[in-house]
Image (tube, grey):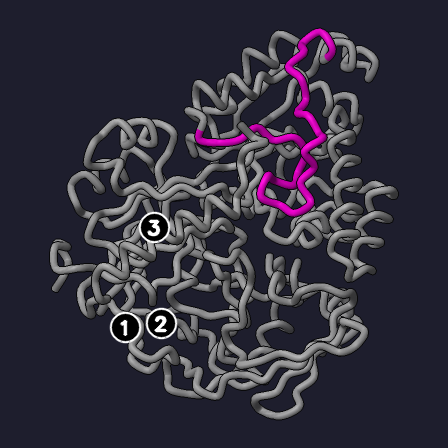
Amino acid sequence: MLKKLVLTTAVTLSALALQAQVQAQEPRRGGTIRFTAPYATSFVSNDSHVSNQIQDEIYGYALHRSLYKWDSVNNKPVLELAKSVSTSADGLVHTFKLRDDALFHNGRKMTADDIIWSYTRLMDPSKNYPGAAFIRRIKGALDVQNGTAKEISGLKKIDDFTLEITLIEKGEPGFLFRTATTSIFPAKEAQDPNFFNKPIGLGPFKFVEHIPGSRMVFERWEKFYVAGKPYADRLVISPMGEAAARDVAFRNKEIDVSILGPTQYVAYQADANLKKGILEVAEVFTRNMGMNPTYKPFSDKRVRQAINHAIDADLIISRLVRNKAYRATSWLPLSSPAYDKALKPYAFDPEKAKKLLAEAGYPDGFEFEWTASPNESWGIPIVEATIPMLAKVGIKVKVKPVEGSALGGIVAKGDFQAYIWSNTSGPDPLTQMKCFHSKTPRSACNYTTFSNAEVDKLIDEAGATDDLTKRNEILKKANAVLYEEAPVWFFNYNKAVLGYQPWLHGLQPNATELALQYYEDLWVDETSPAAK
């Protein structure tokens, strides 16, 4: 089944189907879009730079804009806040001609100064902004993070609407500057202590209110730079971390979309009406259990390999995840251009696991604490399924439950022995493999503080070439070493499924995260309960 999966084809077919649906009707103006943020019961912050969780990017796509956006149909980044970009002969210097019609929600034009300030803020050495993982690829950004400079030397303002960005290696800048974690904030206004009580951005909707644990409300920004958009008058995003609660709300027609968990996936497929409103995509996410090497047993790769052999991942995917996933081999997912079809997943082999544990000095096993959120696809239910499997090889598990909105902060601080999470592993393989480079800090994305000289060398070599075929082959080698070193339990690659109401139009099959939609493209027809 895995060999037959071709993401681009699947995404394109989904996109064509959605386009055909939209073309059948002209987009309608007005009404309210009622969206859900399905990964926790609250948002972490009104500051989109702070959180490393998709939960907060969901509202960030309404309020803010980044230099690039993701083209879901063609699976590539495209310019958003710039009209054009030119690249130097050596592939390092990128000169952007910025839009001169992008207005913040207070009516002020965005300029190069706002981008420079936003990117510099992300490298603040006293903070752990997740966007730093991308900005650190700009020349001089690490000097700011290390406290040896106050300005990023690779950012140069030519004039108000011309910005020069120099990278430390060749690569497509669109992969770096497209997420809500690299949103462009208004430089002067964002320094006001009260700014995040009512933040302003460049997005299609402006902030109205945030009732923690209940909803975030937005209204149309009439001066959005795309003519005629957004279509909806209002947008309400409700955090709903429990799949069962989303299911009830969706069936009661109280929300327009719902990310489906395994149980709902099976139920909606079996329902003649609900199955008409299902959008599926193979996402660029790897579900995994990260192991902290400062906890002694996990410093030995034989122990980490033993855990990979001790867990019957295929059984869990089949029984609990209801096949709403693909078995992981190493880190890079099926949709990655550097995915290695030759790699086979760790075999379920308890006897081999016992042998490895004995060789590592743990013939009787050991006990560890496993930090997990309630998420049914990659949280506590999955951990509970592994407990008897690990017990058979002598490993005891103590579950440490945490709220979904707190998980990212706990992991970024290293306050765990092990965690289970769903992490971005695409779309750019170089960017994602850098999360396992020894020079990448935990706060940026090297959550297991992985360090391997061979992997470092391969990643550096990949970054030094602009031959994409050669780069991907090098990254395949790095990915294979990662497989051998097993800094995580390689669980699965996600198949995302979204249920949507028949009156909602304009959804995109976003393989980078299906829950992230460009709200300016969405509209509701007159059959919506919130059409007025």
Question: Badge 3 is on which residue?
Answer: 17
- Would you place residue 278 above or below residue 417 in this image? below
Q: Is residue 342 magenta?
A: yes
Q: Which residues are magenta?
A: 324-352
Could you tell me if the residues under marks 2 and 1 are in contact, i.e. CB atoms within 8 Å?
yes
Q: Assign a secondary structure to mark 3.
A: helix
Image position, residue 458 (x, y; %): 83, 47
Question: Please, what is the three-letter code of the amino acid marked with disc 2?
Answer: Pro
Asked whether residue 309 is in view, the answer is yes
Query: Observer-nearest residue: 11 or 184?
Result: 11
Query: Observer-nearest residue: 296 or 36?
Result: 36
Q: Is residue 228 left or right of residue 291?
A: left
Question: Please, what is the three-letter code of the amino acid marked with disc 1?
Answer: Arg
Asked whether residue 443 is in view, the answer is no
Q: On the image, which quarter does residue 444 sit in?
A: bottom right
In space, the residues marked 1 and 3 are separated at their CA atoms by 27 Å
Question: Please, what is the three-letter code of the amino acid marked with disc 3?
Answer: Ala
Image position, residue 91 (x, y; %): 76, 71
> Quick one: label 1 or label 3, which is nearer the N terminus?
3
Q: Is residue 423 left or right of residue 204?
A: right
For the point 29% across and 53% down, which residue is it?
Answer: 35
Q: Is residue 354 magenta?
A: no
Question: Badge 1 is on which residue?
Answer: 220
Checking the image for residue 204, the label placed there is 2
Q: Is residue 506 left or right of residue 307?
A: left
- Would you place residue 438 above or below residue 155 in this image? above
